[in-house]
Amino acid sequence: MSTSILVINCGSSSIKYALVSDRREDRIFGLAENLGSPEARIKGITVGGEALELSIPNADHEKALETILERLSHYNPQAIGHRVVHGGTLTKAELLTPEIVQRIREATPLAPLHNPAHLVGIDATMRLFPELPQVAVFDTAFHQTMPSHAYRYALPKFLYTQHNVRRYGFHGTSHAYVSDRGSELAGSFREGGWLTAHLGNGSSTCAIWNGQSVDTSMGLTPLEGVVMGTRSGDVDPSIHSFLATNLGWDIYKIDKMLNSQSGLLGLSDLSNDMRTLIEASEQGNEDATLAIEVFCYRLAKSLAGLSCGLPRIDGLFFTGGIGENSAYIREKTMSYLPHFGFNLSKEKNDELKRGTEGRIDAGVGPQIWVVPTDEEGRIAKETIHVVETEVHQTTGKKLKAQAMMA
Ligand code: AMP
């Protein structure tokens, strides 16, 4: 492995990592989990596809990062790319400087669960590897091209001007990768109007015109939009006053319910996992059947709504764990979208192998594709771009990895 970028995604008690190199088959990736507890461990895949499991009792983020980097140091990573959920109004990936770290800190009220964990990881890697260029790649940045009529809420103006209350959108790295790759496969790279449906435990939709996000389903936080594993998606905001007045719930309880006990889990009263629900539905579980139906209907409704942001629709891309793997969910969703001339090929949809790219429309009307997402690859590519333009241009050096991601 000649050239590589280390991609890091720090959560509150976990760190996902990937060493992204010139060949996707060579990618090394893993997860450090249960950090801060006796059960802390690293699980991953090494080069050659072998499984790795390493116990690191009581390790914190810094210790886990040290262990990960020790194992990977002989691959000589040339830069580190950090996934950061909220970049506020930052419009692109940024080299980590004290000023950018401060901007990430300032966006914390908008992503209170995510940004503090990212900052812990950034702090640790900056101390451990001060010589390596480090870049923050934001989930929100891709959506900064949305026009104001898409990102503003119909709320008093001062909430926007003084408190940054607006729609930001998330999953930007995935929507950007999938729309670039999908439009390339369709022979019209970054041209035309496309809808993307990123369907995983968290789900969102996006409308993309000539390679730029023009609208998306998530808003101020990742709670707005379509039905997700445990998140409600759109509800009447009066639910807060209804529950407070009638059940005496406080804001924390309501927030927890909407984020962690709703969505597929809330509807089915069984699971947030789509595979489990499909199996239960096949066995006659009516709640699971309804949860799937609501998921697909609301998804189709979101896609139809986002079409208003596009002068024309050239096609739709499915991605994420559900979008890539479930022909059943894709078919059910498209059954609620007979508009715009969409025409799914049942045969092609059913035949598409897991994890592969492929076109699944019948050849008339807008195209429909499945495009497996690659958020790590995209983060690595953006990291290289930032390092090339902001570090090496000034020093005259060239990053070997530049060619690999071209
Ligand atoms: P992600 O968050 O992108 O990893 O996606 C996780 C979701 O994908 C979970 O709800 C899984 O049940 C779902 N998923 C993965 N494989 C399948 C499958 N073959 N059929 C239906 N859902 C799947």
Image: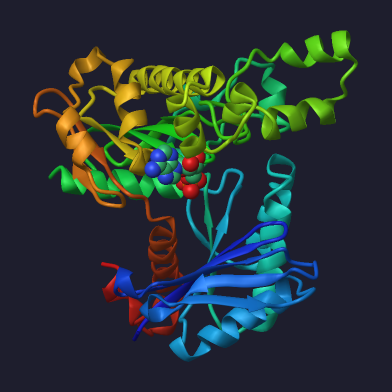
Q: Is residue 64 visible?
A: yes
- Residue 202 falls in image quadrant: top right
**The N terminus lies in which quarter of the figure?**
bottom left
Residue at 72 percent across and 75 percent down: it is: 62
Please provide percent x and percent y for residue 311: 26, 22
Residue at 36 percent across and 18 percent down: it is: 304
Give the residue furthest to the left: 363
Please provide percent x and percent y for residue 206: 40, 33
Q: How many marks?
A: 0
Give the residue furthest to the bottom: 74
- What colour scheme does the image use? rainbow
Question: Height in image: 320 above or below 47?
Answer: above
Residue at 33 percent across and 49 percent down: it is: 372
Please provide percent x and percent y for residue 213: 39, 36
Q: Can residue 142 be seen in this view?
A: no
User: In this image, 287 relative to 24: left or right?
Assistant: right
User: In this image, 245 relative to 172: left or right?
Assistant: right
Question: Height in image: 179 above or below 380?
Answer: above
Question: Height in image: 345 above or below 403?
Answer: above
User: In this image, 310 relative to 159: left or right?
Assistant: left
Nearest the eye: 406 or 243: 243
Question: Height in image: 209 above or below 67?
Answer: above
Nearest the eye: 215 or 267: 267
| Image region (quadrant) for ligand 1 | top left
Give the residue furthest to the right: 248
Please provide percent x and percent y for residue 52: 53, 77
**The C terminus lies in which quarter of the figure?**
bottom left
Residue at 49 percent across and 57 percent down: it is: 93
- Residue 238 falls in image quadrant: top right
